[in-house]
Amino acid sequence: MDKLITCLYRRPSATTRLICFPWAGGGSIYFAQWARLFDDSIEVYSVRLPGRESRSQEAFAQTMDQIVNEVTNTLLPKLHEKEFAFFGHSFGAFTSFATAVTLKQKHNLEPVHLFVSGVSAPHSESRSSVVKKSELSDEEFLRYMSEAGGTPKEILQNKDALQMFIPPLRADLRVVENFM
């Protein structure tokens, strides 16, 4: 489980687990630190996807099913222990939603709450785009990232940082572009 989940503050007596899913290209550390903001009744798990952090040598997920299957198979025993909620931001909103749907359909389990932010609904017309962002040239991709906002200028102007940041972002965009 430690391969997939970052939990910086173990709380065995917690009544609820908050399981957080990262944004496109993101890692697990940011959300794992949220546990400092909660009392002992909430334990925070943060999902670490292939291709980042301690999993940097692994290939990125190619499909939403790959992500959902790994999360579901890994967490299933833990999900029976106590109530759980999901939080996902942007790409994480899609992965948390897809995971919740799979858990309900295949295991008759569901989070007590699904918190999502930073993205339109999976069926929204705003998601339909003729141009797939993951297939843009590097120059067009950087322009898109700059215009979309949310990426610090320091990263966009640092070629070394971009070499680390762009591959997982493109991989996650490919997953979302082919989801639903």
Image (cartoon, grey):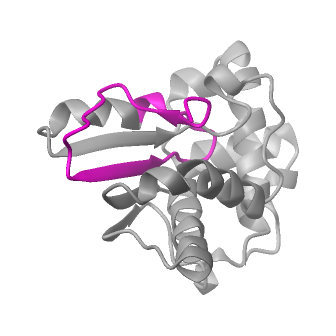
Of the 4 image quadrants, the one containing the C terminus is: bottom right
Q: Is residue 4 covered in magenta?
A: yes
Residue 143 lies left or right of residue 108; in this view the side is right
Q: Is residue 120 above or below residue 150?
A: below
Residue 56 lies left or right of residue 119; in this view the side is right
Nearer to the camera, 61 or 106: 106
Residue 117, given in percent of the width and then of the height, sits at: 40, 62
Nearer to the camera, 119 or 10: 10
Of the 4 image quadrants, the one containing the N terminus is: top right
Residue at figure coordinates x 34%, y 61% from the top left: 85
Query: Does the magenta stretch mainly form a helix, a strand or a loop?
Result: loop
- For residue 141, which quarter of the picture? top right
Which region is colored magenta? 1-30
Residue 88, given in percent of the width and then of the height, sits at: 45, 56
Residue 151, given in percent of the width and then of the height, sits at: 53, 37
Residue at figure coordinates x 56%, y 74% from the top left: 107
Residue at figure coordinates x 14%, y 38% from the top left: 40
Q: Is residue 4 above or below residue 98?
A: above
Nearer to the camera, 103 or 148: 103
Residue 113 lies left or right of residue 27; in this view the side is left
- Residue 56 visible in rendering: yes
- Residue 88 visible in rendering: no
Q: Is residue 23 covered in magenta?
A: yes
- For residue 63, which quarter of the picture? bottom right
**Residue extending furthest left?**
39
